[in-house]
Image: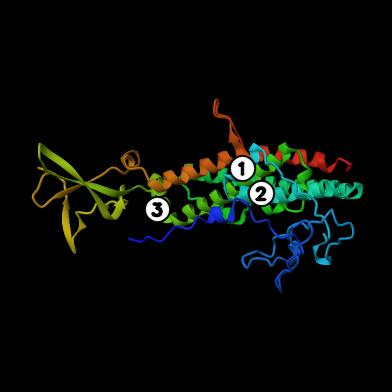
Amino acid sequence: MDNKPKIDLKSRLGKKTVSSPTAGSIPPPAGIPKPSLGGVPNPSRVPAPPFASPSQQPAAPRVDASNPYGAMEPQAAPVRIEPTSIKIEMSDEFVAAQKSGRTKVLVLCIITAGLGAALGFAGGGISERNKAAEAAVEGAGELSKKVDATNAKANELADVLKSAKEKLSKATFPDEEVSKLGGINLPFSAADLSGKGIGRFNAAVVSALIDFSTAVDKVNDQKEKLGNVLSGNKKGVQDFLDQTNKPQIRWSVVLGNGPGGPWATMQPVATPFPAKPEGDKAKWPDDIHIPVGDKQAVLKRYSTGNPISEDGLFIPVDPGSQAAVCPSDVLFKLKRELSDLEEVLRGSQTPGDEKTGLLEAGQNLAKKLKQIGATPPS
């Protein structure tokens, strides 16, 4: 057992606290700068941490008020106070527009830049404000011309769509209209808003510009898709349309014994033949060939007697009933695309589902822009 007496340091030293040495009583070690009288080291002498980015501003220099002869070092003196940045609050319309597609995102960037430039002009004096107003008036005039040109192309496109629909209803493939579709492009885009001073336009006009550019994008995309459907499926569409003038047998049925009695099996005809043979000796083929695995099976055409045979007998299907039972998916999609695109251009007057078309919206927008362009800058 350790019997060494414990030493009570507190009792020996007493309750006295050791006072810190006064400034100047002990010289600072070499290489460390002498603190100022206020006890705060000069921030300009503190080395920047290795992770500090160049864009960070140095801490503001502090001056010892108790030393009237103290002076900042040159590198600590402020060079220039930058103006406070202005925060632009975006309206609900802009926030909603930002979520609606690539066009509106680009437009928002342009609008933000335009508003920032306008605010910058406002802080620069009357001369700069006048320049901004003149730029806005000039920009409105240029935009109105671009909207008018877009409206003219949109009207041309609407007429082509109408003509294509009329030809399809007459069982004629719209070759001419398909060719015209490739040459029509609505020229308005979000890039046209750059540098037009739209930051000085009222919110209604800016919102109309966003909606118009988005609708133009939709029309151009839908027109391109429509042209691809027409040109890429011409043969199928033409064959279907030919059924009106020159109907052909494309389907047949084969009768057989089903689980509950006789039934028919649908069988496509590999080589279609005319439904109405021409000439005195013209008739339907006596047999057709159908693929069965890697071989060809022969089916005889039913003419008389029992239609159910072990070898299989085919019966031609009336082509006039085919469209009602098996409509063409391609033709259906084509008609739907034509109707949708025409509605985007002309709008809809259906009660309860009225929609403003691109043509009407463009006319209203051009009118507002012309009013701005005719207003003397103030």
Residue designated by label 1 = 97
Query: Residue 179, percent across and down?
Result: 56, 56
Residue designated by label 2 = 107
Query: Residue 343, percent across and down?
Result: 56, 38
- Quarter that holds the N terminus: bottom left
Q: Give the quarter of the image for residue 370.
A: top right
41 shown above or below 112: below
Q: Give the quarter of the image for residue 39.
A: bottom right
* Circle 2 crowding by C-alpha within 10 Å: few under 14, some 14–19, many from 20: many
- Which numbered circle lies on residue 236? 3
Q: Residue reaching furthest bottom?
A: 30
Residue shown at 74% from the left, 41% from the top: 366
Q: CA distance from mark 2 to mark 3?
A: 41 Å
Query: Residue 356, percent across and down?
Result: 62, 35
Q: Residue reaching furthest top?
A: 351
Q: Is residue 247 left or right of residue 164?
A: left
- Sequence-earlier tag: 2 or 3: 2
Q: Is residue 81 left or right of residue 353?
A: right
Q: Nearer the viewer, residue 324 or 286?
A: 324
Q: CA distance from mark 2 to mark 1?
A: 9 Å
Disc 3 + disc 1, Cβ < 8 Å: no
Q: CA distance from mark 3 to mark 1?
A: 40 Å
- Sequence-earlier tag: 2 or 1: 1
At label 3, the amino acid type is: Gly
* Circle 1 crowding by C-alpha within 10 Å: few under 14, some 14–19, many from 20: many
At label 2, the amino acid type is: Val
At label 1, the amino acid type is: Ala
Q: Is residue 200 visible?
A: yes
Disc 2 + disc 1, Cβ < 8 Å: yes
